[in-house]
Amino acid sequence: MSMTMTLQQAVVDDEFRSVLLADPAAFGLSVESLPGAVERQDHEAIEAFTEAVVASEIYACASTCSFGPFTIACDGTTK
C-alpha cells in the first residue's frame, strides 16, 4: 500500500487508524504525520434509514413495475 493510500485509509477507517496508531513505525509513519480523522459515522442512523427503505411500499410489493435499477410502482402484475 502506498503512503498516500495508507494516509487516506487512516483518515476514513477508524479501525485501521487504531492499528496504525498502535504501531506507526510498522507503517513507516509517526503519529505527528497523520492527518485528522473524519467524523465517525452514526451507525444507528444508517440502520434506521436501511430499515425504513426495506419497510417502504416500493419494496414490500409482491409484484412490481421496474425501470432500470429502481422499483417505481406496484401495479398488480409480475415481470
Image (tube, rainbow, N blue to C red):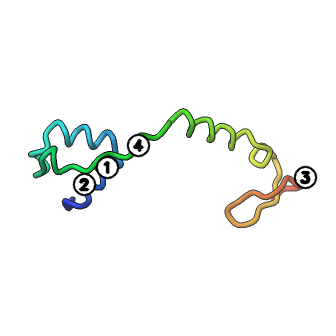
Cα distance in 3D space between marks 3 and 1: 48 Å
Cα distance in 3D space between marks 2 and 3: 52 Å
* Of callouts 4 and 2, the N-terminal one: 2
Q: Quadrant of the N terminus?
A: bottom left
* Of callouts 1 and 4, the N-terminal one: 1
Q: Residues within 10 Å of mark 4 (few under 14, many from 20)?
A: few
Residue at the spot x=14%, y=44% of the render?
24
Q: Which residue is mark 2?
A: 7
| Secondary structure found at label 4 | loop
Cα distance in 3D space between marks 1 and 2: 6 Å
Query: Which marked residue is nearer to the observer: mark 4 or mark 2?
Result: 4
- Residue 42, given in percent of the width and then of the height, sits at 49, 37
Cα distance in 3D space between marks 1 and 4: 9 Å
Q: Residues within 10 Å of mark 2 (few under 14, many from 20)?
A: many
Please say if the residues under marks 4 and 2 sit with CB atoms less than 8 Å apart: no
Q: Which residue is mark 3?
A: 76
- Residue 34, given in percent of the width and then of the height, sits at 21, 49
**Amino acid residing under circle 4:** Glu
Please say if the residues under marks 2 and 3 sit with CB atoms less than 8 Å apart: no
Give the side of residue 61 with respect to residue 11, left or right. Answer: right
Please say if the residues under marks 1 and 2 sit with CB atoms less than 8 Å apart: yes
